[in-house]
Amino acid sequence: MKAGIVGLPNVGKSTLFNCLSNAKAQSANFPFCTIEPNIGVVNVPDPRINRLEELVKPERVQMATVDIVDIAGLVKGASKGEGLGNQFLANIRECNAIIHVLRCFDNDNIIHVDGNVNPIRDKETIDIELQLKDLETVEKRLEKVNRAAKTGNKEAQTEKTLLDRIRENLLQAKSARTVEPQNADEEALLEDFQLITNKPVLYVCNVDEDSAATGNKYVDQVRELVKDENAEVIVLAVGTEADITELETYEERQMFLEDLGLKEPGSAVLIRAAYKLLKQQTYFTAGVKEVRAWTINIGDTAPKAAGVIHTDFEKGFIRAEVIAYEDFSNFGSEAKVKEAGKLRVEGKEYIVKDGDVMHFRFNV
C-alpha cells in the first residue's frame, strides 16, 4: 500500500519526502526537478512498541512501515500531457492514497509557478487536472458499457448508472469520491474503476516556522474549503522539520520542538495519518527474540493477520491467543496477563483489533 505526495512544483513535496524517509530526493528551486518517483519505506511512529520493548526487552524491534512516493509537480494541462503530465498521472494512479501538499507560506526567495501564494487556487488546479483525467477514463468506459446496456445486460446497466453519476459529478468539478455507492455492487465497481479522484486524500499545509503550532490565514482558508470533503488537514513547517531531522540527538530534537510549541515532529503525525488513510492498522508479536508491529487491513480476521507473518500460518490456522495492548501494558508481562485471566483464545472469525498482542497456533 502506497501513499503518493502530490502538489504543484515548489510547494515542498521533495523536502517533505526527505523528512519522512531520510532519503535524499532532489530538492531544487525549479519545476520538474523530480521526474522519476522516489519511494521511501517509512517507519510508523508508535509509542506502544516502545512500551512493549521496555517490558519484554527483546533482542530486536521491528516497527510497522508505510510506503511514501514522491511524485513530481503537476501543472495546468497535465491531463493533456503538459509538463510531464502523463507520467505523473500514471504514478498517482499506482498509489492507494494521496497526500496533497499545499504551499501556505510567503517567501519571495522561492518562486511560485503561478506568481503568488494562493493554496485555494493551487488545490483547484490539481483537482481539475485529476478530474479531467478521470472524466476521460469514465467516458471511454461508458462508450463500451452503453452498447452492452442497450442489449439488456443487467451488469452493464448497473455500471452505466454509476458511471453516469460519476460523470455528472466530474463535470461539476466534484471528485469521484463525492459519489456515494448505493450498494455492494456499486462499491466493488467504484473500486474497480481505479479513478484517481476516488482515492482518499490528506491535505498538508506547508507553513513557515512561526505558524507550525497554530497555522495561519492560508491554513484557515484550506480548512474552510475542504470541510465537506471528509478529509484531514495537517499543518507542517516542512523546512523546519527538515532542520529537525538533521539534529544528532533525541534531546536536541525535543528542545527544538518545545521552542516551536510542539510535542512531537509533525512528520510523525503525518505518517500515522497516512497509515490510517490507507486503512491500515497494527497488531504486535512480543517475545524475547523480537517485538514486532505487523501491518494488516482494518477488518482483517485472525487467519488473515497470521498470513502476514507466513502463508503457512494462515493455511494451517488453529487459533489465536490474544492480549489487548492495554492489558499487556498494565500487567507488564504475558504471565501476569494470564494470571489475571485477561488472555483470550480466538478462532477463525475473530476480527483483529488495533494494538492486539497475538500469538498464533497453527498446523501445516
Image (tube, grey):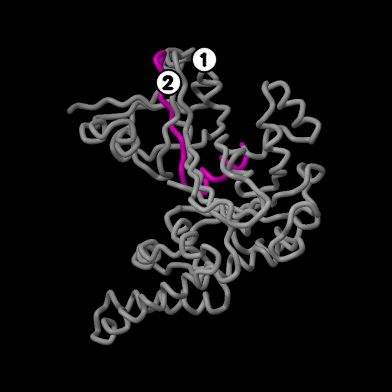
Q: In the structure shown, which secondary structural element does the residue marked by tag 2 occupy?
A: strand
The picture places residue 59, in percent across and down from the top left corner, at 44, 13
Q: Amino acid at mark 1?
A: Leu
Range of the magenta residues?
268-291
Residue shown at 65%/52% (left/top)? 233
The picture places residue 237, in percent across and down from the top left corner, at 72, 44
Q: Quadrant of the C terminus?
A: top left
Label 2 belongs to which residue?
286
105 or 344: nearer the eye? 105
301 or 263: nearer the eye? 263
Label 1 belongs to which residue?
55
The picture places residue 220, in percent across and down from the top left corner, at 76, 57
Q: Earlier in the sequence, mark 2 or mark 1?
A: 1
Residue shown at 30%/79% (left/top)? 144
Indicate left or right for 270 with 195 as reference: right
Q: Amino acid at mark 2?
A: Ala
